[in-house]
Amino acid sequence: MSGGVDSSVAAAELVRAGHDVVGVFMRLGSPGETLDEPIAAEACETGRPLKIGKQGCCSVGDAADARAVAAELGVPLYVCNFRDDFGRIIDYFVDEYARGRTPNPCVRCNDWLKFGKLHDYARQLGAEAVASGHYARVGERGRRRVLMRGRDYGKDQSYVLFGAPRDRLGEMVLPIGEYETKAEVRARAEELGLPVFDKPDSQEICFVPDNDYAGLVERKRPELRVKGRVIDEHGAVLGEHDGQHRFTIGQRRGLGIRTDEPVFVVEKDAAANTVRVASREALSAGSLVAAEANWLVDSARFGEWQRVLARVRHQGEAFAARARVCEPVEAPTPSGRSAAFEVAFDGEVEAVATGQAVVLYDAGDPDVVLGGGWIARVGGGDGH
């Protein structure tokens, strides 16, 4: 229970269905946080005053809202102290930018905490399943459990859940995924008398104050703020920048240069601290290689090329493509070689960025998630 409307409605629906519900608020921490008194590492009952930040999905206001909803539903609410574990996500975020990659901390949080440590804690409580307010579904195909897109495609969050271990699909409950629209969820919250029915959605990365991600990176790694070159596709110098970590693939504005035609960031070289810009056409890629593969179906079927739909960003389109398992590749998180696959798109796809996730859906059953991985290389596969 994050204190938002989605997880609150999920909890309410489970209570109304007759389940024995225990609410859990994940105390993650934010830069500059203070605590009025310590929280036991293994979890404690709420009621102790918290000051844990001002924004995102795990702030002090969210803790108070979660407590109010739990009281309305008549369920106990516990706080899990995942602050130390959350530090791993912040370190990952900073390290990926330092490597010239584009991180996705929300996916990592789901993998490592919400469907990692939180499931472990649920077992300690004797719980049979963990429910959340994600816009996705768990269904069945034949005799197997599958992860599926939420019915509201505009809010679908299956992309950020691809890393859930396959054997935990049976422990996942996703009530919100059955709602057709967010408006229906809010209307249901108001009908149930939940005080968060009109609470705005969080938009920021919860651990980035004022949405200044570059400032956070530089506070953790001050050596990264160093002058570098902005170059064109031929290597000619167009200007200077204050660190390649301040740019993302596909960025057009805020480049600090003047050109006759619009240009976009198409490549970053962390070792040389250069940012390469080019025309929009240079943003396109026909293939990629993904590391840290997580399959939610039998991966043996991908020994040969299989038709899929592939998404390379959370709110992005699912592109027609082919995918197959390939030789393991180096992955920075975790370190070492990892299981991998390659994707060949039917056409060109813009702004494919290393460090982002690529998630595969069944071409014949587009709601079903097949698995996914983390983009290690753009191009370089054998698909084209």
Image (cartoon, rainbow, N blue to C red):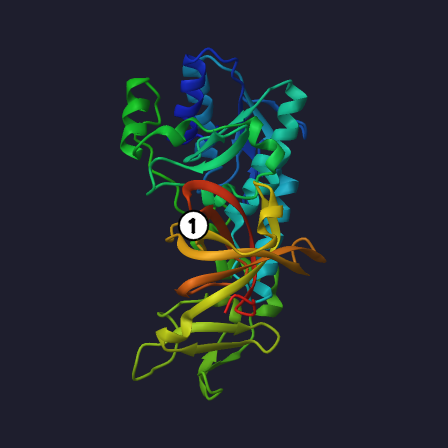
- In the image, 160 versus 106, the foreground residue is 160
| Residue 53 locus on image (x, y percent) | 49, 41
Judged left or right of residue 228, residue 334 is right
Residue 33 in view in this figure: no
Judged left or right of residue 245, residue 189 is left
- Up-down relation of residue 196 to residue 290 (above or below): above
User: How dense is the environment of label 1, judged by Cα within 10 Å: few (below 14), some, or many (20 and up)?
Assistant: some
Would you identify the image quadrant in which residue 289 lies?
bottom right
Judged left or right of residue 23, residue 83 is right
| Residue 253 locus on image (x, y percent) | 35, 69
User: SS of the residue at dot 1?
Assistant: loop
| Residue 145 locus on image (x, y percent) | 53, 31
Residue drawn at (61%, 38%), measured in percent from left and top? 165
- In the image, 139 versus 263, the foreground residue is 139
- In the image, 217 versus 264, the foreground residue is 264
Would you identify the image quadrant in which residue 137 lies?
top left
Residue drawn at (60%, 38%), measured in percent from left and top? 113
Residue drawn at (49%, 15%), measured in percent from left and top? 75
- Which residue extends farthest right? 336
Residue 278 in view in this figure: yes
The three-letter amino acid code for the residue at tag 1 is His
Q: How many marks?
A: 1
Residue drawn at (60%, 37%), measured in percent from left and top? 166
Q: Which residue is mark 1?
A: 314
| Residue 194 locus on image (x, y percent) | 35, 21
